[in-house]
Amino acid sequence: MSNKKLILVVDDNAANLKVLGSILKENGLSPAIALSGANALKSIKRKLPDLILLDIMMPDMDGFEVCKQLKQDVETQDIPVIFLTAKTEQEDIVQGLEVGAVDYVTKPFNSKELMARVNTHLELKVAKESLKQALATKDKFFSIISHDLINLFNALLGLSFLLTDPKIKLDDAEKEDFLQSILKSSMQGYDLLKNLLEWSRSQTGSLKVIPATLNLQKLVEYTIGFLDENAKNKQIKIFSSVDETTLVFADENLLNTVIRNLLANAIKFTPEKGQIEISAKQARENMVEISISDTGVGIKPENIDKLFGFDVSYTTLGTHKEKGTGLGLMLCKEFVEKNGGTIGVESEEGKGSRFYIVLPSQDNHSTLKND
């Protein structure tokens, strides 16, 4: 697949289209042509160009109207439009900018000047998209922090209130248990923040995946302990059938984050007195499949494809009206793929869900993705 930028040239003069097409090709760009404004709009619906060179003086629909329609459509409003025309009056230039054009090149044009402007606006478009993604990433990061920290502080606050409530009489053994639980939650909170900071680094391109051979049973037991209070609040039983000999080759922090999010998701959508099981099996040569199955509410078929998408923030309330960010599963997909694995789900509405991840069981550096 070609990575060349697609430039749509709109002009009712075939000779102009031929000249412009040649210039764009010579400069490593992919030209598309349209002989009218109406044809241009149809072409754009089929495939969005990276930039549009648009003539103004055309019959039926002039360039001003084409640009105006593009800027009114959410799908096309961010495509940079450069007017390329013989109209040089000041009011024409102002009108062009008012309807949304980013630049204005007059005919006859100098090919070097034209390409300088085209390349400038292509670069600006990339920068704008990067900034937009960075802002979305920032929002996603803070949403995930708030989601996970709420779980942590619910446990800390609940135990602290029990310890400090004068109406509740606790013996020394009970107090010791509560203090140990508070210590445990505090240590897990510290680990959580470290993991989230690692994810932050991944979004800035500075994360290095550091894989190691991990004992999956120990990792799963730690994660179950991390979310034990959440499960107890709904009287949910969590079972692990992961064998002590099961090994995976992955970054420990990233895998911890994945399993924690999948288990928290299972607890969220499992009703009181339900069950969750974590298991593992050999998937294929040098790969392990880890499953988290629940007896929860399941997922509607039309919503399954939305779960891991970055372009759709999908979230629903849990069985106890628990709120989520709709971002945890996207995070899981990103981290699993960085470890050379895949993630998927099997679910039927009303009959629970099974999330599964497939990861290397031994060193295979070719599968890992470092930023």
Image: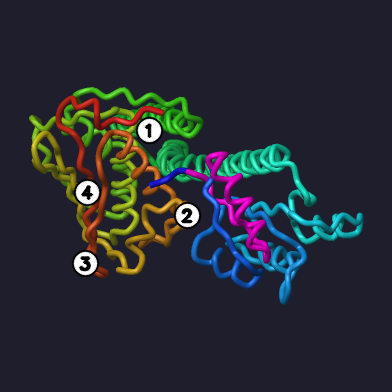
Q: What stretch of residues is rendered in magenta? A: 4-28
Callout 4 secondary element? strand
Whichever of callouts 2 and 3 sits on the residue coming sooner in the sequence is 2
What's the residue type where badge 3 is placed?
Lys
Callout 1 secondary element? helix
Q: Which image quadrant is residue 88 in?
A: bottom right
| Label 1 vs label 4, nearer the camera | 4
Q: Does the CB distance between marks 2 and 1 fall below 8 Å?
A: no
Q: Which residue is mark 4?
A: 356
Residue 165 appearing in the image = no
Q: Which residue is mark 2?
A: 311
What's the residue type where badge 4 is placed?
Tyr
Within 10 Å of disc 1 (Cα), the crowding (few <14, some 14-19, many 20+) is: many
Real-space CA distance between mark 3 and mark 1, rounded to the nearest whole angstrom = 32 Å
Frontmost residue, 194 versus 38: 38
Within 10 Å of disc 2 (Cα), the crowding (few <14, some 14-19, many 20+) is: few
Q: Does the CB distance between marks 2 and 3 fall below 8 Å?
A: no
* Residue located at (91% from left, 55% from top): 90
* Residue located at (18% from left, 43% from top): 290
Total count of labels = 4
In the image, residue 339 above or below residue 12: above
What's the residue type where badge 2 is placed?
Asp
Numbered mark located on residue 185 in the image = 1
Furthest residue to the front?
A: 15
Which quadrant is the C terminus positioned in? Answer: top left
Whichever of callouts 1 and 4 sits on the residue coming sooner in the sequence is 1
